[in-house]
Amino acid sequence: MGTAFVLLVGINDYAALAPAADRPLTSLNGCVNDIRAARGWLEGRLEGPPPRILELTDGEATVAAVTDALRTHLGQAGPGDTALFWYAGHGTEFPATERAHLYIEPTGYCQALVCADGILIDKDLGALLDGVASGGAHTVAVLDSCFSGGATRLSGGLVKRALPHDPSWPAYGDPGPRAVGPRTRDIPAPAEAARHVLLAACRVNQASYEDGHGAGRHGLFTRALLGALRDMGPGATYRQVLAAAGSRVQSATEHQNPVLYPADPGGIADRAVLGGAADRPLSPHLLLHGPDGWQVDCGSAHGLLSGREGVEAGGRTEFGVVEADREGDVVRVRSVEPLRALVTPVGWTPDPVRIYPVAVSALALPPTSVVVEGGDRALLDALDAAPLLRLADDGLNTNGPGHGAGHGPGHGQVFKVVVGGDGRARVLRRDGTEATAPLPAHRVPDCLVHLTRWHQLRDLANPASPLASLVDVDVSVWNGERILPDGHGEIRCAYADGRAPLVSVRIHNRSHDRTLWCVLLDLTDSYASHAELFPGHFIGPGRTGYALGNAPVQLSLPGSRKAEPGAFVRDWLKLIVAEGEFSTVPFRLAPWSADAPPAARGTDEDHVLRFTRPPHAGRDAGPGTGGAGAPGQWHALTIPLRTVVPE
């Protein structure tokens, strides 16, 4: 193991800023305690060479000192080393006025750490950390301050770590945003966009709090994070530790939700804390104990049915634990909210300090009805046993003898499978068109489960939501006019002079008083789903979010289709809007391919919704659960899009 280079910054005393602000400023009491406690954990936890720790407290922690230490102290870390920046102190926010900032700050505000003599803007901090990571070190930031690091304190109770911004405070120079080029459909963001991992005390629009008395005063987040790190031990991933810490913070206040960034599955968030390989099984979802009891971070916004709709679908929704020592243990859903499911353990008692990776093992969703023509008993048995599928003896004109259990077509999708004498099968939609290219008959169950999951994402809707009229999506020609839907309700984007079209995609929050969490999925006609366009962010009232940070979105035919006159490809842009943050991981789905080995395809499918116990190689679903209290509202909007080569 390499060397850990650590920069600890804790600021209780802000007296130096008071003259510039011309008003008394709230001092804090637990920030220095926080970094001393973090130092104690580090010195007792790390293996290998002793950590090289630099502390800056109170008046030492000037903007110049912090930025210099980030460059020179953490900058010493190289390949195999770890660089950790831990900050405890005030945070602040101020209106974003520069156009470049507005492209990447859809809330309309910039956030900053408040140093002893001025502010360090979050984008500048990110650039400094990425500079450290560019040297090859595993780079981590922990921010316990408002607006993703913050606090103001109330006598004898919770105190918030936030200060109102004063324009007279000096700031570190903004290097400006990185240039972003066009990105094509089905291509993930480049790895360099996520060079460091951030564990933040709260969301961008929230406060962070401290509590305790005297020498025992600490930030809620620092106390919860260190407790989770000690309880979970080595090998726990950032995602698992943040979920555990978030649950503990929520037990103290529903107004603070810790955040992990980036939360992309399989990336830096799924590494063991401070580097190394994780020794825990990964899974699509996490079971944890919160203020309302046991809960799983998957709700109706992710596709779980609730209320009468769930009852009519039939069956019970259950999650199974995937850790080897809890093999066979399940929890049963008792209540579904938009962003989480409250659950009851069935026949076992979970440990409240543990975070259990779980997968959906039984899901109350309308099944897909399948009519089979020409299949043998092995295929019928496999279809009958597959999740989300049921054999039907009506619902389509089979033009021949159909086989099934007599259940009827139900309310879900309907497919017809026609098996030829050569053992290959055609999968037909309700209207008789082919859903996929012909495939070996033994791959039909896998294909239909994949298609069912994709259709559930495309058809996700909540038409009665009060958010329905508050947010919309504009697709415009790059540097041009808005593209209006045609007579079929589709957005049509055409090639010109052999060049693929470039468009701009904007998400408008038309609310006057609500900040809303928005995710924009791209569902392709290859039965894939990804969230690279707008992977999840809060958009402030009256503000606009820009896909790819206002970089051009290139729409093109995939490489397998020749760009010849008449050729086209379809996408469905799916906007999901909620009052609280939620994980986007369950919405990820790789393209369907009959040639892909089932195991490899299964790994990608773990990003969406699981219906059976996965192998120990899935992906965590992330910690965003929306918080305690009454469930928030959510809405889903679908924008059909067709990219064509003109005749």
Image (cartoon, rainbow, N blue to C red):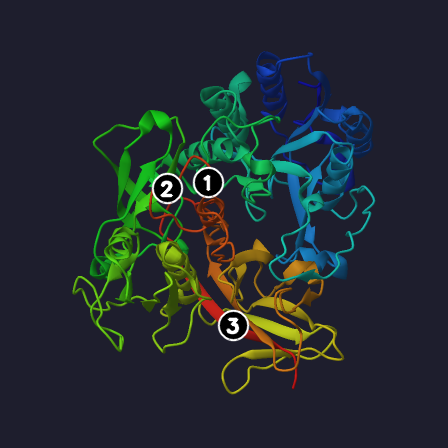
Residue 116 in percent (x, y) is at 74, 31
Q: Are marks 2 and 1 in contact (CB under 8 Å)?
A: yes
| Rendering quarter of residue 543 | bottom right
Assign a secondary structure to mark 3.
strand
Which residue is tagged 2? 359
Query: Image point 63% across, 37% down: which residue?
Result: 197
Sequence-earlier tag: 3 or 1: 1
Q: Amino acid at mark 3?
A: Ile
Assign a secondary structure to mark 1.
loop
Mark 3 closeness class: few <14, some 14–19, many ≥20 residues within 10 Å: some
Sequence-earlier tag: 2 or 1: 2
Which residue is tagged 1? 618
Q: Would residue 383 be found to the left or right of residue 9 on screen?
A: left
Mark 2 closeness class: few <14, some 14–19, many ≥20 residues within 10 Å: many
Of residues 532 and 387, the one nearer the viewer is 387
Assign a secondary structure to mark 2.
strand
Which residue is tagged 3? 639
